[in-house]
C-alpha cells in the first residue's frame, strides 16, 4: 500500500495553486497592457496628444482584478476646449462592462441565464479568481441586454426597409408564437398590474434527426419581450431578417393559440395560420364533459369538416340542460369560430411545399409549449421571481440568444478587445520551460528550487515536500 508521512488537504492545495497561477496571470496581463501603452506613447503624434502622466485603472478578469497604469493625454478640441483621452483604451477597442473583461462578462451572463443573480455571482466567484456580487451580475445582464436591444432596433429598422442582413435561404419558414405570464415588481407592478404577458416567437426552416425519434429545430431564431404586439412583431421580423434572406421565402406557417396579437403576423396570403394543436385539443377536453361529444368533434376535425363541427358544437350547446355545461360549449364555439381558418393543420391542407434544404425534414408545427418552458419559463417563472419590465426584457433577450446558440458570438462582438499579437507572443516566450528557472520580467521572481516560504499562507508547500513519491510502496 501507499504510505504518506502526513495527510495533506488536497482541496486546500488545489486552491492555493490556483491562486498562485491566477496571480502570475494577472502580473503577465499587467505587463502586456503597460508595454502596449508604452508603445502607443512612443508612436503617438506629439503635436496632437500631449502626455500628462500615468493614471491607474483596473479590469476585472477571470484571474482576478488586474491593476495597471496607462498614459493620459490632453487633446485640444475644435471649439478650443481640452479633453483627456487614453490611447490604450481606444486602441484596444474594448466595450468595458462594469470594468469586466469579455471572458468574465460571458461567464457571468451564461450563469445568470441558468440561475438567479445571487447564485450566478456565487458560482462565478467560486470558479474564477474574481469575486463579484449579485448586484454586479445584475448590472452585467442589464448592460448587455441594453446593447442587444440596440442591435434589435437596428435589425427591425433594416427589416422594415427590406434591407435585412440575413443570407440563409429557405423557401418555407415555420413560425410559432405564444405568451407566458410573469409576475412584476416595483413601479412596473404599479403601472401594469401584478403580472404581465411576455411574448415569445421562434422561427426555423425545419428539423434534423439527432437521435432515435429525437429531432432538433434547424437555424432557429427567437425573440421575446413585454412590448405591445406591434412592436413585438417588428422585432420578430428583424430577428428573422438577420438570419434569413426574406426575399427567398415563399411560404410561412404560423402556429399560435389564437391570441389576437399573434394573428397580427398574418400580413399576406403567403402566411398560413394554424391553431396550435395542443391548445385546440385542450379546449375540447376542458369545455366538453361528454366523452361521445368529444370523440365526434375530434372525428370532424380529423375529416377537416369544420363547417359541420361548428354546427355540431352549437347544437350540443343548445341541447344540454346544465347551465355550466352550456356556457362551456358556447365558449368552445366562440373560440373555434374565431380561429376556424386555423383548425386544419397546415400539413393537411394540400399545399404545394417546396423541397426542404439538404439534411432537413419538414415536421408538424406544435413545439411552442416546449420552447416557452426551455427558453423563458425555466429561468423566469416560479421560485417567487418578480421582474421589472426593463429587467425582464433584458434577460429575455439573452435567453433567446442562448437558446439559439448566438449568445457567445454576440458577447464577443460587444465586448471585443484587441491586443496586438506580438504582446501575446512575448507572454508565450516567458512561460517556456527553458526560461522558467531564470530571472524573467521586472519585479517578479519565478519559483526556484530552495526552501519554501515560511509565512502561514505558504506552509502547505512544506507539507507537499514531505509526501513520498507515489511510486514508493512498503510491502
Image (cartoon, helix red, strand yellow):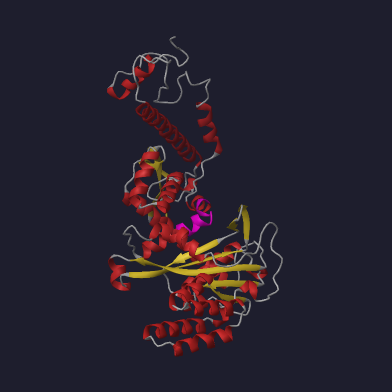
Name the residue located 39 percent from the left edge and 59 percent from the top edge.
380
Measured as percent of width and height from the top left, residue 374 is found at: 47, 58
Q: Nearer the viewer, residue 105 or 76?
A: 105
Residue 156 visible in the displayed image: no
Q: Is residue 340 above or below residue 464?
A: below
Quadrant for the C terminus, please. top left
Q: How many marks?
A: 0
Magenta stretch, overall SS: helix
- Decide whether residue 399 is among the magenta residues: yes
Name the residue located 38 percent from the left edge and 56 percent from the top edge.
81
Quadrant for the N terminus, please. top left
Measured as percent of width and height from the top left, residue 111 is found at: 41, 49
Measured as percent of width and height from the top left, residue 66 is found at: 38, 38
Q: Nearer the viewer, residue 280 or 390?
A: 280
Name the residue located 35 percent from the left edge and 47 percent from the top edge.
121
Measured as percent of width and height from the top left, residue 211 is found at: 61, 51
- Decide whether residue 293 is among the magenta residues: no
Q: Residue furthest front?
A: 292
Q: Nearer the viewer, residue 280 or 52?
A: 280
Region rendered in magenta? 398-408
Residue 182 visible in the displayed image: yes
Q: Residue furthest top?
A: 475
Q: Nearer the viewer, residue 390 or 312?
A: 312
Amino acid at each position: 500500500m501507499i504510505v504518506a508521512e502526513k495527510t495533506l488537504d488536497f482541496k486546500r492545495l488545489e486552491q492555493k495553486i490556483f491562486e498562485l497561477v491566477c496571480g502570475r496571470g494577472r502580473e503577465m496581463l499587467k505587463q502586456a497592457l503597460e508595454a502596449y501603452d508604452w508603445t502607443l506613447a512612443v508612436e503617438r503624434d506629439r503635436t496632437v496628444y500631449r502626455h500628462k502622466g500615468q493614471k491607474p485603472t483596473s479590469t476585472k478578469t477571470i484571474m482576478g482584478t488586474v491593476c495597471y497604469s496607462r498614459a493620459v493625454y490632453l487633446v485640444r478640441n475644435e471649439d478650443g476646449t481640452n479633453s483627456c483621452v487614453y490611447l490604450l483604451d481606444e486602441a484596444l477597442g474594448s466595450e468595458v462592462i462594469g470594468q469586466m473583461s469579455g471572458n468574465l462578462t460571458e461567464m457571468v451572463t451564461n450563469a445568470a441565464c441558468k440561475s438567479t443573480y445571487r447564485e450566478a455571482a456565487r458560482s462565478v466567484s467560486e470558479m474564477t479568481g474574481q469575486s463579484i456580487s449579485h448586484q454586479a451580475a445584475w448590472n452585467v445582464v442589464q448592460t448587455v441586454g441594453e446593447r442587444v436591444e440596440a442591435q434589435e432596433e437596428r435589425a427591425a429598422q433594416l427589416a422594415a426597409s427590406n434591407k435585412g442582413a440575413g443570407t440563409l435561404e429557405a423557401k418555407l419558414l415555420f413560425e410559432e408564437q405564444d405568451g407566458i405570464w410573469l409576475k412584476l415588481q416595483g413601479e412596473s407592478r404599479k403601472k401594469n398590474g401584478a403580472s404581465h404577458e411576455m411574448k415569445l416567437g421562434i422561427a426555423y426552416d425545419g428539423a434534423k434527426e439527432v437521435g432515435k425519434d429525437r429531432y432538433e429545430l434547424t437555424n432557429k431564431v427567437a425573440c421575446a419581450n413585454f412590448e405591445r404586439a406591434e412592436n413585438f412583431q417588428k422585432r420578430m421580423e428583424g430577428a428573422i431578417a438577420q438570419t434569413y434572406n426574406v426575399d427567398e421565402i415563399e411560404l410561412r406557417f404560423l402556429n399560435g393559440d389564437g391570441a389576437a396579437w399573434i394573428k397580427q403576423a398574418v400580413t399576406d396570403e403567403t402566411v398560413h395560420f394554424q391553431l396550435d394543436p395542443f391548445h385546440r385539443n385542450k379546449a375540447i377536453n376542458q369545455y366538453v364533459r361528454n366523452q361521445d361529444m368529444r370523440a365526434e368533434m375530434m372525428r370532424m376535425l380529423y375529416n377537416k369538416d369544420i363547417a359541420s363541427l361548428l354546427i355540431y358544437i352549437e347544437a350540443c350547446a343548445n341541447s344540454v340542460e346544465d347551465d355550466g355545461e352550456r356556457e362551456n360549449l358556447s365558449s368552445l364555439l366562440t373560440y373555434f369560430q374565431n380561429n376556424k381558418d386555423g383548425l386544419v393543420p397546415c400539413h393537411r391542407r394540400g399545399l404545394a411545399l417546396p423541397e426542404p434544404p439538404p439534411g432537413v425534414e419538414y415536421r408538424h408545427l406544435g413545439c411552442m409549449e416546449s420552447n416557452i418552458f426551455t427558453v423563458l419559463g425555466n429561468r423566469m417563472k416560479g421560485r417567487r421571481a418578480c421582474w421589472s419590465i426593463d429587467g425582464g426584457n433584458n434577460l429575455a433577450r439573452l435567453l433567446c440568444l442562448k437558446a439559439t446558440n448566438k449568445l457567445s458570438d454576440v458577447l464577443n462582438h460587444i465586448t471585443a478587445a484587441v491586443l496586438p499579437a506580438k504582446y501575446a507572443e512575448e507572454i508565450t516566450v516567458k512561460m517556456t520551460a527553458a526560461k522558467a528557472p531564470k530571472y524573467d520580467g521586472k519585479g517578479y521572481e519565478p519559483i526556484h528550487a530552495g526552501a519554501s516560504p515560511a509565512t502561514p499562507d505558504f506552509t502547505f508547500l512544506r507539507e507537499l515536500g514531505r509526501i513520498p513519491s507515489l511510486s514508493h510502496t512498503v510491502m
